[in-house]
Structures are given as C-alpha cells and as structure tokens.
Amino acid sequence: MNLILPQGYEPHLTIRQTQEAIKYIRDTFQKEFGREMNLERISAPLFVEKSSGLNDNLNGIERPVSFDMPALPNETIEVVHSLAKWKRMALKKYGFQPGEGLYTNMNAIRRDETLDNLHSCYVDQWDWEKVITKEERTLETLEDTVKNIFKIIKHMEHEIWYKYPQAVKRLPEDIFFITSQELEDMYPEQSPRERENLITKEHGCVFLMKIGDKLKSGEPHDGRAPDYDDWQLNGDILFWFDTLNCALEISSMGIRVDEISLEEQLKKAGCEDRKNLPYHHQLLNHQLPYTIGGGIGQSRLCMLLLNRAHIGEVQASIWPDEMRNVCEAHNIYLL
C-alpha cells in the first residue's frame, strides 16, 4: 500500500465543513477562471466511440473502461481519459475564434491508476481549450498563459483565507520556469520524480516544460501521448506540498500539435497508423484550429488549498478497506 502518513496531521475542518469548502472552491474558481481566460463553459461527453480516435491514451499504457451499446452494435464505447482532442473538435464545431475558448467539467475513470495520497481511479478536472493563431504557437504564449493560471490560483488562496483562515495553505508568490532537459542536466543521477521534488521544493511552484520527447539520457522525463500536446510547447504546473513532502501536480497543459509536430511525434511513438483516424486526418489536412489547452485537477486544487493529506478527503471514490482504516487511525478521513 502506497501511503504517506504525516505526523501530527490535523484537517482543521470537519467533514461537513470540508464539503462546504469544496463547493465554494469549485464554484468560485471556475467562474473566475472562465472570466480571466475568456472561456465559455460547455457540456462534454463522459464516453466516446473508440473508432473516433478522440479518447486520449495519456502515457500510452492505461486501459480505458469500455462497453458495448445495443444502439451501436458494431462499436466499442470508451469512458474518456481526458478531452484534449474532443475539445479541439468542439472549438471548430461551435465556431470559436482566436482568443476565445471553452472549459468543461471532465469526469473520467482511470482503472490502472496506483492508489495513494495523490492518485484516485476517479478523475475530476476542469478541461479547457482556447483557439490561437499559428503565429502564437510560441513559448511566450505558453508562459504568459501559465502565469495567468498561477495568478488565478493565487487569488483563490486569498478567497479561501477570508472564509477558512484556519485551513488554507499559503502558496508562493511566483512561478519558476525550467525545461525537463535543464532539470536532467542539474540532477543527472536522480529519477524524474526526485528531480521534480528537488526543484519544486527550492522554488515553491514550478512550470516544468517540454515533456514527452527523449532527453539526452535517452529517456523522456515522463510519457505523453503523441497526438495532443506539442512536446516542445507543453508542461506541468507543480506546487511544493509540505504536508506530503513532495511536488503536487495541479495542471498538465500545452500548445497542441500542429500538422508538422503531429507527423513527427506519431513517427517517434510508432503510432503512424493513427493518421487515418477522423481527428488525426482533419488535423493533418489543416481542418482544425490551432489551440492551447490543458486540465486543472479539481480535487487536487481543493487538496492544495485546504492543505489535505489525501485526495480522498476532498473526493468521493473507492479505496481499499486497509487504506481507509489506516488513514482514519491517523486523522485522515476519506469520503
């Protein structure tokens, strides 16, 4: 069982107060996020047809939950892993223009997840996507967007402090930018996770850029699907989380692949057969808008702002009885 049990842990809010705080954070954040990022909230699917190619295979090994449907006898239906490709299709379908975007409440099941303090088989996040021009596919656009998201999260910290001063976690004043190759050069003997912890502990909050391609060591910092993020224009927002003595990823995001980077990344990943899927075919034929997008974990954000030791304190999910019992013995009450 993978579990961190902080000594002397106190949640500061009762379970009912925690539920109230969760609702407040979710309601307040999404309104401010949509306003500051110029995003409209839209409805999104829980599942998609496998043949569409719209589901994301994340790092390439997770198995989606799938089922059949009498109305579609020759089709396999998959519960979404994320909505990265679907959102891009939706931006075209709904006629969004450069500078405009959408966000949605995305719920997913990740059956192969290893359960611990930070990981659940149930995923809840704000998935967002915004149309940009080809000229805006730059590091400057990426970094400006990251800074804006960081500012919104910082503002939420102040909102929570006014309402729950005894429970809020204090966040750093700025975010530090570094590439995965620069990080490997700094700590060549450490694992990717150890590198993340070292740099995030030093700076408090980090945007770790350029994830997915192989580094000088011959290995990528982390796996990324080849058909949504451009591996040269993406990254993760990480906060140092003292409660668990580790880096906490709040968001994975990036400028999405164009026709050139999609070709290159499919070849590197050995997935060139995907070119014939509807989404990939449209993208390669210049039929989809250029976009930037990502996901912000709802439960992860609540966990960060309320300084909770386990994601199960802010999210109702399934946990092994042994984990529930051990957590409760250490003042960690899973929903």
Image (cartoon, rainbow, N blue to C red):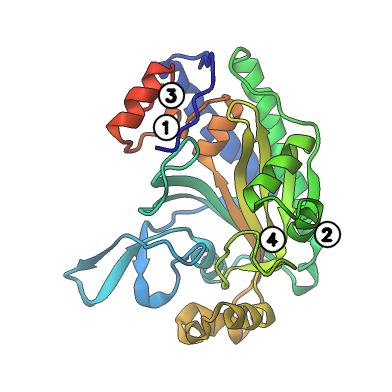
Mark 2 surroundings: few (<14), some (14-19) or many (≥20) residues within 10 A: few
- Mark-to-mark CA distance, 1 and 3: 12 Å
According to the picture, the residue beneath numbered tag 4 turns out to be 234
Q: Residue at x 58, y 25 (%)?
A: 307
Locate residue 88, reporting x and y percent: 56, 67
Amino acid found under the numbered disc labelled 1: Gly
6 to 298, vertically: above or below: above
Amino acid found under the numbered disc labelled 2: Glu
According to the picture, the residue beneath numbered tag 1 turns out to be 312
52 to 8, vertically: above or below: below
Amino acid found under the numbered disc labelled 4: Asn
Task: Say the numbered circle drawn on residue 19.
Answer: 3
Instruction: Tell which circle, 4 or 1, labels the residue nearer the N-terminal end.
Output: 4
- Mark-to-mark CA distance, 4 and 1: 28 Å
Res 266 seen here: yes
Locate residue 200, reporting x and y percent: 73, 40
According to the picture, the residue beneath numbered tag 2 turns out to be 140
Kindly indicate the quadrant of the structure image that contains residue 148. Answer: top right
